């Protein structure tokens, strides 16, 4: 969810001192994602080439889900 993305990126900015992780810049990045990148999800879903994972879980859980999804694709990719 957008609010979770905002929270995580603001936290990252606070921890790392990244000046580009502020609310205004993050909101702009998310707006660009919504207009330029999100439409690609439908394209790849229609081609049955989209793999989704729940990114709202912990870093460890997301990492495991991504690895599991990639491993599941291995036989398909040859």
Image (cartoon, rainbow, N blue to C red):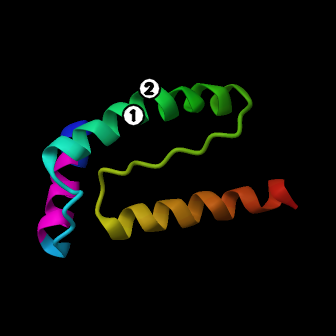
Give residue 20's mark: none
- Quadrant for residue 26, please give it: top left
Q: Is residue 31 magenta?
A: no
**Dot 2, how many residues are within 10 Å of its Cα: few (below 14), some (14-19), or many (20+)?**
few
Q: Secondary structure at mark 1?
A: helix
- Quadrant for residue 27, please give it: top left
In this view, 44 is above or below 57 = above
Q: Residue at x 74, y 30 (%)?
A: 47
Residue extending farthest to the left is 14
Residue 56 in view: yes
Q: Which residue is mark 2?
A: 35
Q: Which residue is mark 1?
A: 32
Count of numbered badges drawn on the protein: 2
In this view, 21 is above or below 6 = below
Q: Secondary structure at mark 2?
A: helix
Q: Residue at x 72, y 56 (%)?
A: 73
Asked if the residue under mark 1 is in contact with the one under mark 2, i.e. CB atoms within 8 Å, the reply is yes
Q: Is residue 28 left or right of residue 53?
A: left
Q: In front here: 4 or 76?
A: 4
Q: In front here: 71 or 49?
A: 49
């Amino acid at each position: 969810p957008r609010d979770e993305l905002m929270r995580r990126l603001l936290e990252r900015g606070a921890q790392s001192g990244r000046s580009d992780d502020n609310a205004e810049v993050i909101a702009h990045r998310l707006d660009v994602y919504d207009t330029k990148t999100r439409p690609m999800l439908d394209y790849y879903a229609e081609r049955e080439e989209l793999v989704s994972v729940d990114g709202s879980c912990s870093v460890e859980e997301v990492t495991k889900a991504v690895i599991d999804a990639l491993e599941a694709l291995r036989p398909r990719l040859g």
